[in-house]
Amino acid sequence: MEKQNRRSFLKTSALIGAVATGISTKTANAKPKNILSEDRMGVLVDTTVCIGCRNCEWACKVAHNIPTEDRIKYEDRSVFKHMRRPQPNAYTVVNEYPNPKNAVLPTDVKVQCMHCDHPACVSACIVGAISKEENGSVIWDTKKCIGCRYCMVACPFQIPSFDYDKPLNPEIRKCDFCFERTKQGLLPACVKNCPVEALTYGPRNDLIKEARERIKRDPDRYLNHIYGETEAGGTSWLYLANQDFSKLAFPSPGDKPMPGTSESIQHGIFAYFVPPAFLYALLGGIMWITKKRNESK
Amino acid sequence: MEHFTKPSPVNKKFFTPGVLVLVLLALNGLIFLAGRLIFGIGAVTNLNNQYPWGIWIGIDVAAGVALAAGGFTTAALSHVIHKEQFHDILRPALLTAMLGYTFVALGVSIDIGRWYYIWHPLIMWNGNSALFEVGICVMMYLTVLYIEFLPVVTERFIGHVKLKSIFSFLNKPLDSLLRILDKGLSKVMFIFIILGVVLSTLHQSSLGTLMIIAGPKMHPLWQTPVLPLLFLLSAISVGFPMVIFESIIASRSLGLKTEMNLLSELGRMVPPILGIYLAFKIGDMVIRGTFVYLTEFNTASVMFVIEVLFGVIVPLRMFLSEAVLKSKPLLFIASALVIFGVLLNRINNFVVAYKPPYSYGPYFPSIGEISVTVGFISLLVLAYRFIVLNFPVISLPDKSFVPQSKFAIRGTQK
């Protein structure tokens, strides 16, 4: 590099600039689709109705070809002694919490992916395998997945789970909002199999209206809070309860979309590759000036 | 400027008792690595759905990238600002960076569930993902580092290509190929040197963006929107201490005289950078009011205090003292403290600060995880030793110049 003269330096710098611009237009087009349809679907979970029968757990496994225990075993309520979380072989689980208003009727809460409107996992995924679909589902292309588990780090609800014990092709797994079923006009398996209609499937906007209506109709029964309306920027799954959501082990991720800060930093640093290209030019300039100064010494 | 030294292979035996210990540690790590490949991540690690990332990300990747920052800081110092007197430390720093990033890449590959898909980000892009940015930059920078190291390889083999028997007809073409490569490289190397510095600034900072998306899952003492800046500043400030640290160790292990003048000069440049890092770290804490968490007594607050006090404040004070800069052991301790501070900072950010909303207990690395990490570090040191013994990396007194130069070798070599 000693033999570098000004002319060839400028030539190469110009070339690099051109390459950088070329790349930047490509990335601008390569952004993952971020559709937020007005008609996106959701589910309203009324925890005051849920009886903890765990039919949804069973139906979910059947719909996703996961081996299930005998159906009779699902009547065993001793599983509620410990809090359970979604697993690679259980995309949804029901947990039970004490009910301060009625000691004999505990509150049961179904847990699954919330299907955020601005999903952290979609923003985080290194290969862009996860996507928010027009109907509200957050699904993923397992063929792309490299198993880095960044979606698990990002998820504010701690939902994605991972096959830690598979040496080959371990998968990220979570609730897919029965994307294959809804595509054919079927209800999500859990909604279909709920015997007490604790789950209501419908357009998210209508569900919010319905939830408000229920709270208005029976203010003693419900806490005036629709969990998921604003949490983490809004989620497709919405919850009603008769007690504070923190008592039911719901996290408080705040009302802002989770990817907001990281994406603005990311796009600020890169901004169509202008800052990196500028830094490159600046360093090149310094390099050239200090070299000349050294030579004149 | 006159050069009394010339990078040359060090004439020493590879095996020593210390090297044997490293070999054993490396083997132990490889055994657990085989376990991971055969039985899956769950079999050898304590990772689970609550704690998806452990020390393989915190130490092998995040701290590995930070501690390899000596490569781009010395490249900027010597090539961009043209401080020619630091020429002698360039190649060792470059070698450390090259090996460091190689092991970062290995560390990532074994941590991800599908290691055979490590190339996916090359063709499957997600510009919103900080991890994608880190991944692409690290891959590009690793390539740049290999290119920057190529002249060392050509220098070693030009005029020394001596293949035996049936391959002997290749000697001439290979030699001329090396000469063409060497000549071409010297013309375009400046492109890669600047590219290396730019790529480093980019991914060192993006590594800090990684945990921002975890939001409230990360302890507020570390979770801040300025994390990328803190990561970049800490990486730059650990660059020179890392070079000092490894120079002192290498010269001791290889029986060479430490170039204290040079190292003191390097040490003199540490306080301003470390000071700016400390100012941002404390300033961020004051602005966000997170010092209230220091009144609690728990793992997070204790780790934070250790990190800032022993990893930043104490070494900063030490580097400001002339006596420390002039004394080899004290300079070594000060540098080791900065390294410790940055290592701990990365562990804190990725492991200690991560508090999942639902967990069945805290995460602590398993024997398998520790073994693999230690094994990788041992392999890195062994590779370093092998390369400096066989390639012209470390600057030794040039015999064609003044033999009684200040860089005289002590010990058995005469």
Image (cartoon, coloured by chain):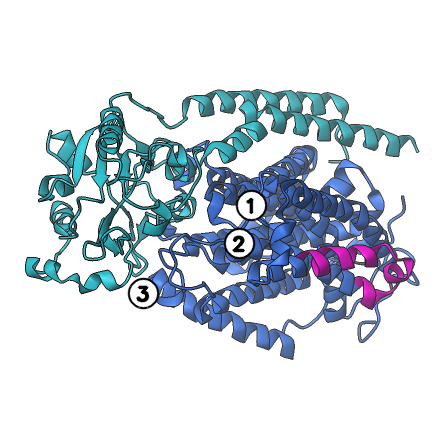
Which numbered tag is attached to residue B402? none
Q: Is residue A106 above or below residue A127?
A: below
Residues at marks 2 and 3 on the same chain: yes
Q: Nearer the viewer, residue B154 or B46?
A: B46
Which numbered tag is attached to residue B39? 3
Q: Nearer the viewer, residue B230 or B187?
A: B230
Q: In the rendering, at what x and y percent does residue B168 appear?
A: 55, 54
Q: Quadrant of residue A204?
A: top left
**Badge 3 amino acid:** Phe
- The residue depicted at 42 percent of the width and 69 percent of the height is B32
Q: Secondary structure at mark 2?
A: loop
Q: Earlier in the sequence, mark 2 or mark 3?
A: 3
**Badge 1 amino acid:** Gln
Q: Which residue is mark 2?
A: B353
Q: Is residue A186 visible?
A: yes
Which numbered tag is attached to residue B223? 1
- Position of A37 with respect to B97 (left or right) is left
Q: In the rendering, at what x and y percent does residue B264 appear?
A: 85, 56
Q: Nearer the viewer, mark 2 or mark 3?
A: 2
Q: Mark 2 to mark 3: distance in Å? A: 29 Å
Q: Which residues are magenta?
A: B307-331
